[in-house]
Image (cartoon, rainbow, N blue to C red):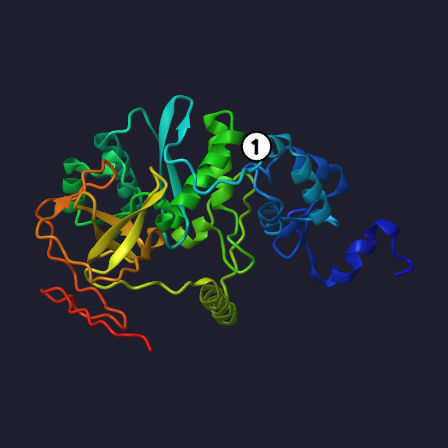
Amino acid sequence: MQDVPQHLHPYWCFRDDLTILDGLIMKGNRVIIPTSMRHDTLELSRLHDAHQGITSTLRRARRTVYWPKLQDDITEMVQKCDDCQRHGNKKSRIPERQIEFQGRYALVTVDYFSGFLTYDTLKVQTSEAVIKVLNSNFRKFGLPEKILSDNGPCFRSESFRRFCEQLDIGHITSSPYHHQSNGRAERAVGIVEHILKKSRSDVAITKALTTYLDTPVSDTLPSPAELFFNRRINTRLSMNMTPVPLTDQQKTGLNDKRSAHLKSTKQDQVKYMLNQPVWFTDDALDEWKPGYIDSKDSTPNAYWIINDASNRRLRRNTHDIKPRHTFIAHQRPQQTVFDSHPECHVDRESPPPAVVEQPSGWSEIPDSPPEIHHHHLR
C-alpha cells in the first residue's frame, strides 16, 4: 500500500470489489463518483429532490453512488438546504384535514401494504370529483378490497355509497375526532404536505414524489414502489440494475423486529360491557360527557354510546372513552335518538347491536332497581 497514491487509499480496503462497466468504475451496483463531479451530484439535487431527511437521502444514495465520506457530504448538504430549514417540521397532533395547493384541493390515496401513495388535485370537494379520481386510479392499479377514509361529506354521500357498492368495495370511516385511527393515511397526508411546501411547480412535485416512492423504507425493506410493483420505477437517478431480493434470513429478522416493536408499544385495550356507564369526549368542546355503552361497532376499538343528556347515539374510539364509576346501576332509556353531528351520519335503520364482551366483575343490569342493604359499622 505504500506504493499506492494517497488519493487511492480510501479504496484499498475494498479493491477486490471494484469493476469497470462501460467505462465507469463500479463498487457492486454503485457508481464511484469522481471528485470533480461530486459537487454537481449534490447541488443538482438529484439525491435530494424530495427534500427528505439525512437518513432517507443516505438510503437513496447508497443504492446508486459511492465516494469516500459520502455520509458526511450528504449530512452537510441536508443541514444547509434552505428549503428544508425554512419549512422544517413543526410539532402537531395530526395533519390538517384539508390539503390545498395553488387554489386546488388534493386527494391523497395510499396502499396500506406498501405505503405507495398517489396525489391528485381537485377543483371542488364533491363526491363526484372524488369518484372520478378513484375511478382513474382503479383503472391503473386495480380495485381495493376496502377503502378506509375520514368522515368528510364527500365520503358520506349516497353517491359514494353506491359507487363502493357497485364495485363491491368495502368502505370504513375512522371514528369522529380520532383521525389517528387511520394512521397510514395521516402519514401519507403529512408526506404530501411536506413535499408541497417545498415544491414550487408541478414538475417539482413530480420529481419529489417519484424520489420518495423510490426511496427504501428502511435498511431491510425496499421502496414503496418496489413493494407495490415488485420492481423499481424510473427516476432521474435510476440505473439499469436488477434489485437483489431479500433473503429468507432477512425477512425472518424483519418480522421478528416488527413483532417485538408491536409488543413493546401495544397498550392494553379496555373492553366495555353493554350498558356500562362511561365518559366520552368531544374534541369540539374539549370536555368529558356522561353516557353508556349501547353496542360494539364493527370496526376495531370503537363503540356506540348513548349520550345521557340528549339520548343521542354516537360512535367513539376507545381513545375517547373512559369508565364512569357510579354507586347505582345505570338504567337504559327506552328510546334512542341518533347522533346528528355532521361528521358522524348514522342510518336510522341501524343493524342490531353487536354482542359486547363483558369484563370480569360485571353482570347484566336487572330490570328492577337493585336492593340496597344497610349495615351498621361496629
Q: Residues within 10 Å of mark 1 (few under 14, many from 20)?
A: few
For the residue pair 151 and 196, the one nearer the viewer reads as 151
Quadrant in which the N terminus appears: bottom right
Q: Is residue 355 left or right of residue 188?
A: left
> Is residue 111 visible from the viewing direction of this image?
no
Q: Position of residue 121 (x, y in %)?
A: 35, 29
Q: Position of residue 241 (x, y in %)?
A: 54, 52
Q: Is residue 75 left or right of residue 179?
A: right
Q: Is residue 325 left or right of residue 199?
A: left
> Which quadrant of the view contains residue 322?
bottom left
Quadrant in which the C terminus appears: bottom left
Q: Which residue extends farthest bottom?
A: 378
Residue carrying label 1 = 87
The relative height of residue 302 versus residue 237 in the rendered view (above or below) is: below
Q: Position of residue 192 (x, y in %)?
A: 45, 37
Q: Is residue 7 left or right of residue 171?
A: right
Please state which amino acid type lies under the numbered disc 1.
His
Residue under the point 87% across and 56% down: 4
Q: Give the tally of numbered discs.
A: 1
Q: Which residue extends farthest front?
A: 378
> Is residue 333 visible from the viewing direction of this image?
yes
For the residue pair 10 and 352, the one nearer the viewer reads as 352
For the residue pair 335 and 243, the one nearer the viewer reads as 335
Label 1 SS: loop
> Which quadrant of the view contains residue 77?
top right
Q: Position of residue 356 (x, y in %)?
A: 20, 64
Q: Which residue extends farthest top?
A: 103
For the residue pair 36 and 185, the one nearer the viewer reads as 185
